[in-house]
Image (spheres, helix red, strand yellow):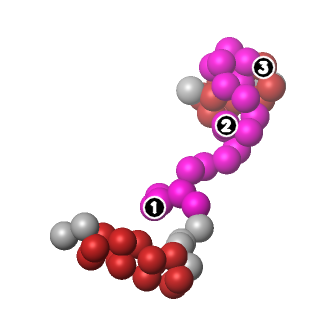
Amino acid sequence: MVREYSARGLVLERALELAGISGSQYYCVKKPGKPGRQATKTTQRMALNKSAKFK
């Protein structure tokens, strides 16, 4: 929608305002996958040991 507006000559800031989104929402594209950092090996081992105790 924003690209259509800007392609027709509308200023990008005004197109974003009409669409109801911020500039950061327009420019930042979400990447696929899980968010955050992968757990360390120590944390992974602790989780495995904890789950093994409850079985």
Give the camera-side residue of 42 and 4.
42
Measured from the top left, where is residue 54 in percent x and y? 25, 67
Q: Is residue 29 left or right of residue 48?
A: right
Q: Which residue was labeled with disc 2? A: 25
- Does the image show residue 8? no
Q: Nearer the viewer, mark 2 or mark 1?
A: 1
Measured Cα–Cα span from mark 2 to mark 1: 18 Å
Q: Which residue was labeled with disc 1? A: 33
What amino acid is labelled 1 in the image?
A: Gly
The quarter of the picture where the C terminus appears is: bottom left
Q: Secondary structure at mark 3?
A: helix
Q: Which residue was labeled with disc 3? A: 14
Snapshot quadrant of residue 23: top right
Q: Secondary structure at mark 1?
A: loop
- Residue shown at the point (56%, 26%) measured from the top left: 1
- Residue shown at the point (71%, 24%) measured from the top left: 16
Q: Which residues are magenta?
A: 16-36
Snapshot quadrant of residue 22: top right
Give the camera-side residue of 17 and 42.
42
Between discs 2 and 1, the one toward the N terminus: 2
